[in-house]
Image: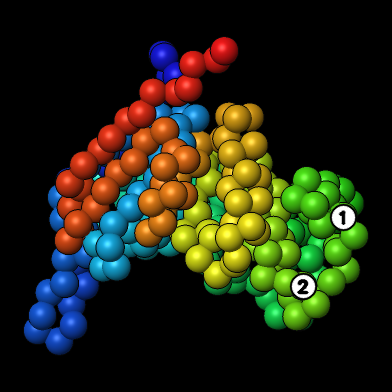
Amino acid sequence: MTGQSPLIEIHNLTRTYHIGRTALHALNNVSLTIEPGEYVAVVGTSGSGKSTLLNILGLLDRPTEGTYRIRQQDAVELTDRQRTTLRNREIGFVFQEFNLLARATAQRQAELPLFYAGISPKESRRRALDALAQVGLADRVNHRPEELSGGQRQRVAIARALVNRPSLLLADEPTGAIDTQTGEEVMTLFEQRHMEGLTLVVVTHDREIAARARRIITLRDGAVISDERRPAPVAS
């Protein structure tokens, strides 16, 4: 990582929601930097600001105050169209509830980001099939969500997130809706991509999942209360 610019830089990030006359501070002056190739877990209790932070990092939401730069580009000042283009180019997002289209096949789900990126149908098909094969679904490409198990749906979501070859993968409680064994398989898939250079940020309430990361950021009441880096294991 030495000599590279940070992938993510956020400074004094605040996100406030107004419910009637009440102001809810989901994030409160959060500052942190994430380098290319890091493996980061974000933990905290419900309501601590984990998902709000991830949504801002994924350009799905805007902060109320503060700055957010990705690859040294000011993401806060971008238009909605520019944000969509940047997100499609740089970021893959995996949600707890999969967020798949009900009537689309696994292949079509994986092709969608490529369609929005302007990739040709032939190349989109090739890359979608390759992504599905990488997550173990080569024999399920024509199946729709109702024909797939929970773990298989999550694998489709992962293929969709990775098909555009993003530099950053954001995962929001990726094992929350699947069984333990499938969750282990999903995390192994993430970690294989991380070993290939992908920057990985996982939001989780599960301390065992968090312990797999090399860095653990803990949020409480919208603020960072700890930022722990763990040394990489020494090769034998």
State the residue in front, 156 or 120: 156
Looking at the rendered structure, the secondary structure element under dot 1 is loop
Looking at the rendered structure, the secondary structure element under dot 2 is loop
Give the residue at mark 2. Answer: 148
- Residue pushed farthest bottom? 20
Q: Quick check: can you spot residue 83? A: no
Give the residue at mark 1. Answer: 138
Q: How many marks?
A: 2
State the residue in front, 64 or 19: 19
Q: Quadrant of the C terminus?
A: top right
**Residue under the image location 17 percent in, 46 percent down:** 225
Left or right side of 122 for 208: left
Q: Quadrant of residue 27?
A: bottom left
**What's the amino acid at mark 2?**
Leu
Q: Quadrant of the N terminus?
A: top left
**What's the amino acid at mark 1?**
Ala
Q: Quadrant of residue 94?
A: bottom right
**Residue under the image location 21 percent in, 72 percent down:** 17
Residue 23 locus on image (x, y percent):
12, 74
Residue 62 locus on image (x, y percent):
32, 60
State the residue in front, 73 or 127: 127
The correct choice, above or below, for 122 with respect to 72 in the image is: below
